[in-house]
Image: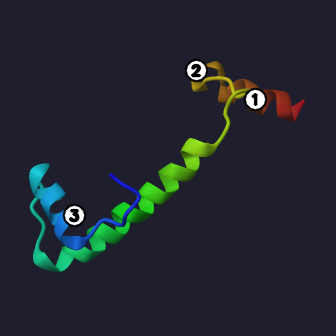
Amino acid sequence: MSSAALTPPEAARWAARAGLPLPDERHCAVAVTADHIHSVVAVLRELDFGDTPPAGAFRAEEEQRDAAV
């Protein structure tokens, strides 16, 4: 998807292509929602997670126990 906003007809076309035909009254809402999700993902892509360990290295039960001590 480009940086241009997704239009309601494009949203309907993409949904139909994915096997999810939309009623006409939902095209605008789906386009707005898709644009919002795209903007959030764009911000997340800019974050630097260089010092963050992978999720598999985190154990919640150990973190909770260490905090209680």
Residue 17 x/y as whole percent: 10, 51
Q: Count neighbours of disc 1 (C-alpha within 10 A) and say few if under 14, some if 14 to 19, many if 20 or more.
A: few
Q: Quadrant of residue 9?
A: bottom left
* Element assignment for label 2: helix
State which tag comes first along the sequence, 1 or 2: 2
Spatial separation of the CA atoms under disc 1 and disc 2: 14 Å
Q: What residue lies at 61% left-to-right and 23% top-to-bottom?
A: 54
Residue 3 x/y as whole percent: 41, 58
Residue most toward the right?
Answer: 69
Name the mark on residue 63.
Answer: 1
Residue most toward the top?
Answer: 57
Tell me which amino acid carries mark 1.
Answer: Glu
Give the vertical position of 30 relative to 54 (above or below).
Answer: below
- Residue 19 shows up from this direction: no
Q: Quadrant of residue 38?
A: bottom left
Q: What residue lies at 29% left-to-right and 74% top-to-bottom?
A: 29
Q: Quadrant of residue 65?
A: top right
Give the vertical position of 40 relative to 60 (above or below).
Answer: below
> CB under 8 Å between callouts 3 and 2?
no
> CB under 8 Å between callouts 3 and 1?
no
Q: Which residue is mark 2?
A: 56
Name the mark on residue 1.
Answer: none
Residue 57 x/y as whole percent: 64, 19
Please state which of residues 52 and 48 is positioned toward the viewer in this rendering.
Answer: 48
Q: What residue lies at 16% left-to-right and 57% top-to-bottom?
A: 15
Name the mark on residue 11.
Answer: 3
State which tag comes first along the sequence, 3 or 1: 3
